[in-house]
Image (spheres, rainbow, N blue to C red):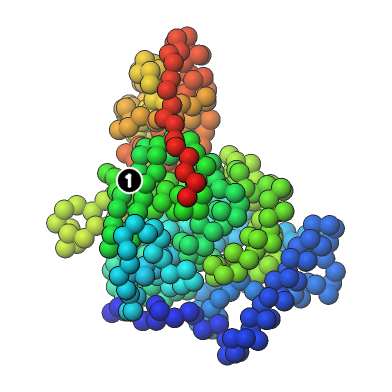
Amino acid sequence: MATNPINLGQKSDLSNQSPKPKKAFFNHKWTIFTVLFVALLSGGLGAGLAFVLSSRPFQQRQLTADEAAVFNRNSDSMTSAIAGVPTLTRPVNILVLGTIILTSDLPDAQSKPKGKYLAEVDDNLNGMSDAMLLIRFDPATKKVAVLSIPRDSRVNIQGVGKTKINFANYAGGASLSAQTVSQVLGDIPIDRYIRFNVNGFGKLVDALGGIDVYVPKKMKYQDDSQHLYINLNAGQQKLNGSKAIQYMRYRHDDLGDIGRVQRQQAFFRAFIEQKLKPETITKFPEVLAIIKDNIDTNLSVEEVLALASYTSKIDRKSIQMHMAPGRFSNPGEFDNLSYWILDNRLLSKIMSQNFGVVMKQADASLVENTIQTLRIAVQDSMSQPEGSKKATTILSKAGYAQVFPASDRWTKPLAKTQIIAQNGDRTAAENLREALGLGEVLVESTGDIESDITVRVGKDWLETNNIPLKPTKPTQAKISTN
């Protein structure tokens, strides 16, 4: 059984070079990369620069041959240069790990005064993975599929045994995490990995000027043992790095880690919509400086540019965000430890439809959504229950047999009704939209957890059905400057 096979208090051994020459080399190399990026934008790359761009300067830990083999199962090149611009040539699967190590977990931990937020080790990537995403970029379909894997998912980790999937990075780094995820998801090939630490994520958000996010409720939590202090007001607000981390890490409600996954997806979509734009290029040098200190990835610069270019051109509706389906473990199961128990039947359907993988563990054909079996949650965003009742009546008359009110209302008033394909079935969501006559279909897992599809009733629904609008009082947030 693996317990603590890595030295948490030390940085990964990057090479056999002495520290001073390496630092000078990296400073010089990052200057080159900034110049190269400008050259790329201005028209193309000379043949002499192609060699430099093929290197992997963001990789903080050199992989052994066996570890590297985990990411080299597909020998076809990921990119090619079209008119001098790196471009994706095939579907690419990338594992993203958000890691965290608390200073209180280190061997030389010292007590710190209460009230100080962020007790993470700035430059260590070897901790548990608080966030785990598998992202597929597919140039053939012009889509991006994202699968969030809850950190508490109970899986078998080679050399460790049955435990939570977030332990894989702690036990064996990115390669063991990728090996574990691949095994769980039907032996899917994983081409590259990205690991980032929590502190670096906050710095990146600050460098990009913050992210506008709607916080659905007040989030307040204090854990003196971890020096973790979360205090967010409800409402629409711009989150700086510190607040963004609080928003992403909060899990102290009825949904626990699943609620955190939903917030990660909401933040991910907001980040893409707001920051993956041409004007962000002006901040590239600052972003690059943060990346080189806080990210470990085996992506080359050429591959990073190809992915960024591809994603910046993707329509919002082409980004499909899924969550590995399952259930909470029951009291008394697994020695009363809290786990997320994956549902392989539902998971196999997501993998076959969105990731091109047929899972041997389960038959996707066993899961067929019909209007009799679909679970439809209707969620009010306008504080007018007559709108939700009208939607429920129409769907019931259309033959949908399982329509029920969502467990909570959506506290942000919506101009447009949203139809959330909670379990990833876009076709079923679009058919439901036809029954309603309006609505924006989104493939993500931010809806009611007990539903297959969540309908968020917006202002357009009330207007279309001649339901008089009542004044709404959206929750306002106090903007924090710290």
Of 264 and 464, the residue lying toward us: 264
In the depicted structure, whether residue 139 falls above or below residue 384: below
Query: Quadrant location of residue 53?
Result: bottom right
- Relative placement, left or right, of 362 versus 76 is left
Q: How many marks?
A: 1
In the picture as drawn, the residue positioned furthest to the left comes out as: 332
Q: Position of residue 321 (x, y in %)?
A: 49, 47
Question: Can residue 2 be seen in the rendering of this structure?
Answer: yes
- Relative placement, left or right, of 6 versus 288 is left
In the depicted structure, whether residue 50 falls above or below residue 39: below
Which residue bears the numbered disc 1?
A: 220
Q: Residue at x 55, y 53 (%)?
A: 205
Q: Residue at x 60, y 49 (%)?
A: 209
In the depicted structure, whether residue 433 falls above or below residue 317: above
In the depicted structure, whether residue 150 falls above or below residue 195: above
Query: Quadrant location of residue 115?
Result: bottom left
Q: Quadrant of the N terminus?
A: bottom left
Of 419 and 408, the residue lying toward us: 408
Q: Dot 1: what SS?
A: strand
Q: Position of residue 51 (x, y in %)?
A: 76, 76
Of 258 and 139, the residue lying toward us: 258
Q: Residue at x 73, y 70 (%)?
A: 31
Q: Position of residue 336 (x, y in %)?
A: 17, 59
Question: Can residue 424 be seen in the rendering of this structure?
Answer: no
Q: Amino acid at mark 1?
A: Lys
